[in-house]
Amino acid sequence: MVRASVPAVLATVLLAAAAGQPAAADGFYSGFGIGQFDADNDSTFINSAAWNLFAGYELNRFFAVEIQAEYVREGSDTNKFDMRAEFGGWMVSPALLARYPLADDFELFLRAGASAVDYRLVNEELGVSVEDRDVVPVFGFGLRTRRLFLEYVNYDRLEGTYLEQLRAGFVLRF
């Protein structure tokens, strides 16, 4: 499970402060984010930093399409049996966003898509050492203002390891 972190708390404060900005017009946008990435199984809990760049198009007030590239810095954990686990990699994730406007400048959104993951996973306890590519479903939800966002994303499982991320960032509109 994603643990509370200083960036998430700061992002929440920034989202609340930015809620008074003017409404966004339909069209293209891009942005970047940073977050806390977890790769967990039954006995190890790997926490690492992640960065993402994205571009999207608002089809209308309720739907948008988006593609993002994400980098997960390699992280590791050793469990109580001295078994080591490591995870790191790159992802490319196209998605559809269903948006629910709470106000002209503040919205909830749901993310549904897929992620092509190029990863390195080592788990001594499970006897897994893999450098591979795979495609997994992506589901998420978050809050967005005209310029800021906060989002939780779940990437399903790879080799028995659950992947999830809590991230915050900036949105640039064209």
Image (cartoon, helix red, strand yellow):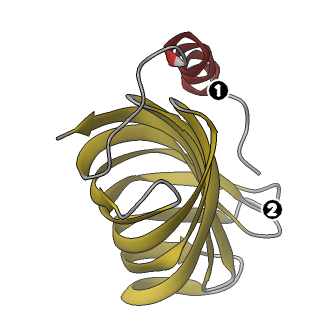
Q: Residue at x 49, y 36 (%)?
A: 149
Of 168 and 3, nearer the camera is 168
Quadrant of the rendered structure where residue 66 is?
bottom left
The amino acid marked with disc number 1 is: Ser
Residue indicated by mark 1: 5
Indicate which disc, 2 or 1, sits on the residue closer to the N terminus: 1
The amino acid marked with disc number 2 is: Phe
Q: Quadrant of the C terminus?
A: top left
Quadrant of the rendered structure where residue 120 is?
bottom left
Secondary structure of residue under mark 1: loop
Residue 62 percent location from the top left of the image: 53, 59
Position of 84 with respect to 55 (left or right) is right
Whole-angstrom CA distance, mark 2 to mark 1, is 27 Å
- In the depicted structure, whether residue 121 falls above or below residue 56: below
Secondary structure of residue under mark 2: loop
Residue 101 percent location from the top left of the image: 61, 43
Crowding at label 2, few (<14), some or many (≥20) Cα neighbours within 10 Å?
A: few
Evaluate whether residue 9 shows in this view: yes
Position of 137 with respect to 29 (left or right) is right
Residue indicated by mark 2: 81
Kindly indicate whether the residue at mark 1 contacts the one at mark 2 (C-beta within 8 angstroms): no
Residue 102 percent location from the top left of the image: 67, 37
- Report the mark closest to the observer, 2 or 1: 1
Crowding at label 1, few (<14), some or many (≥20) Cα neighbours within 10 Å?
A: few
Of 136 and 29, nearer the camera is 29
- In the depicted structure, whether residue 51 falls above or below residue 164: above
Q: Residue at x 31, y 62 (%)?
A: 68
Disc count in the image?
2
Position of 167 with respect to 73 (left or right) is right
Evaluate whether residue 154 shows in this view: no
